[in-house]
Image: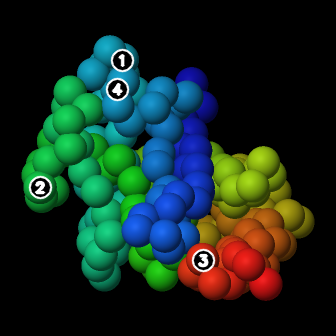
Amino acid sequence: MTRKVDAYIQEYYNNGEIEYNMWMHYNGVDFAFLHRNEEAALFAQYYKRKMLSSSLSKDGMSFTDTHGQTISSESYDSLLAGIKGLENIDKGLISLIGGCANLDIQSDLTIHLNGEEYPIVRNVNGENYKSYDACGFSKKGVSFEELAKLDQQISQLPRSTKDKRK
């Protein structure tokens, strides 16, 4: 079975200001329903632990328990539900990529934004997807072209309600 992580970036309004949230699906299952799919839930737990081992910060990350209920802090068996705020999403992308390319995870990663898909991590092919690990052991690589397209789209997102009106 191919492991895959889909992350969806969406804007929402909070007290009249535009904010952004990114939420996760694991092997096609929304984080809130992982309790109904044991295999996807175990993958999500393992992925989170591997991803956070390479992360410098948990800023803006939200976690759930194994039943999809939001919890106040990360624990061993919690799941990564999402990341709030564009700055945190930007920082979190590196950890998401690192987690997917981890030798124990080996997962595809697709980011969804404004109806577009950005297949960031796939199998290394030497052309579009370059190895992410320095030794080249990982089967998963990063498309820096797709990452640049995503970064371009993120940089064009309005940062506040005032920006949206321009």
Mark 1: amino acid: Asn
Residue that numbered label 2 is attached to: 72
Please give left or right for residue 102 compared with residue 126 in the image: left
Question: Is residue 112 at least partly visible in the picture?
Answer: yes
Residue that numbered label 4 is attached to: 34
Image depth: mark 4 or mark 3 in front? 3
Mark 2: amino acid: Ser
Density class for disc 1 (Cα within 10 Å; few <14, some 14-19, many ≥20) is few
Q: Which mark is residue 37?
A: 1
Mark 2 or mark 4: name the one nearer the start of the chain. Answer: 4
Mark 4 or mark 3: name the one nearer the start of the chain. Answer: 4
Q: Are marks 3 and 1 in contact (CB under 8 Å)?
A: no
The residues tagged by marks 4 and 1 sit, at their Cα atoms, a distance apart of 5 Å
The residues tagged by marks 2 and 1 sit, at their Cα atoms, a distance apart of 23 Å
Q: Which mark is residue 50?
A: none
Mark 2 or mark 1: name the one nearer the start of the chain. Answer: 1
Residue that numbered label 3 is attached to: 161
Q: Secondary structure at mark 4?
A: helix
